[in-house]
Image: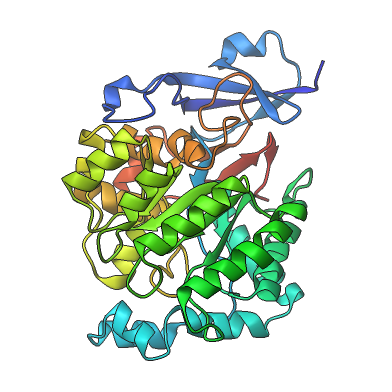
Amino acid sequence: MPNQTLIGPFREILTLESLPHAGPICDDQLKIIKNGGIVVGDENILAVGPFEDLKKNHKNIFEIEDDCVALPGFIDAHTHICFAGSRAKDYALRVSGKSYLEIAKTGGGILSTVHETRKASLEELSSLLQKRCEQHLQDGITTCEVKSGYGLSGKDELKMLHAIKQVNEKSVGTRCNVPLLVPTCLAAHTRPPEFQNNKDYLEFLIQNLLSKVKDENLANRIDIFVEECAFSKDEALSYLQKAKILGFAITVHADQFSHGGSEVAAKIGAVSADHLEVSKEKEFLALKKANVIATVLPGSSLGLGLPFAQARKILDHGLSLVIASDWNPGSAPMGDLLIQACVLGTSEKLSLAETLAALTFRAAKALNLDDRGPLTFGKKADFLAFPTRDYREIFWHQGKMKPVQVWKNGKPMLN
């Protein structure tokens, strides 16, 4: 019998159980437990229900003295937070009128971060990543995907993935204040200067990198950027087919500036297609038919001054919508997932239930994680306490209200 602790009472607990994994959700579908408690044992949830009822059978109580609402921990399913250096110069050029692609063609963009990341040691990268992870946990993110992609060589991609692994090992079984990290190999972010053509670089990755990533258990997910400044549809399909044979799950940077990436994601059977800023009905129908999750990245739109992905239409076409931060040094430097989700929800007219689903159990599916998301028996005890009596105030404050406590694996993380 695991050690059991009753945590509460919470004015409201939003369990997010029994909600659909795709399509629209109305707020009246939310199950809200008033004056509730959560029983945790080991790292999982054992029970959720009225606090006074649970109190009768539990002596070990972590008492919540102030008015709080409990939500599942947030899951950020798309980030690039393992990097070194700054792209403040790029930002200044963008707000002066230069486009993302123009900056990339003149030596800025991804390759400028590659230069700085290659110079950084493994220890420096791990330290920088841990600081960003600590901030993410403070903001309520208990699970976070992290991509490589700023190394673009066998040695430097492995260095990035080892940095992610080092920080992740600190998150397991300890009170280190970082989320659980889900690594993704994005070595196909763009072509490095050492290679003359994309075909040779992608073949180099297949022959020289991906087997090492597997052998060293550094990632089981592969990503590729399908865009004019990166890789074509045909190049991406060939690369992903080979990666899939090696046993990698697939996600795709799709339709950020031009169409094509979502077509690749649908053809290859990707778990998710991420970005989708220029996607239209044709793309939505293809993704729906292929059962691909649609991950939108409002932070990128805010950072680049471009329109949001059509989140409302994505849901109305019956897709599973996930909202992620895209935290990166170039197009999405803010990194605050809740603010981004609130702003997107206002713009795209998303219900609060749809936004919560996109940050929790639907995001878990985008990372192939079945052990977390809703606050129900057997799931990971990852949840948040917000200082309010009414969950709607969290969104009314548009992300400025932050959690006063974060539980990861049933343990409180904030001092």
Residue 337 is situated, as x and y percent measured from the top left of the image, at 43, 54
Taking depth in this image into account, of 244 and 413 the one nearest to the observer is: 244
Tally of marks: 0
**Which quarter of the rendered picture does the N terminus lie within?**
top right
- Residue 201 visible somewhere in the drawing: yes
Relative height, residue 108 to residue 156 (above, below)? below
Residue 21 is situated, as x and y percent measured from the top left of the image, at 39, 28
Residue 130 is situated, as x and y percent measured from the top left of the image, at 67, 64
Point 34% across, 30% down: residue: 22
Residue at the farthest bottom position: 106
Taking depth in this image into account, of 90 and 31 the one nearest to the observer is: 90
- Residue 296 visible somewhere in the drawing: no
Point 30% across, 62% down: residue: 256
Residue at the farthest left position: 281
Quadrant in which residue 135 is drawn: bottom right
Q: Is residue 258 left or right of residue 195?
A: left
Q: Is residue 121 left or right of residue 200?
A: right
Relative height, residue 153 to residue 320 (above, below)? below
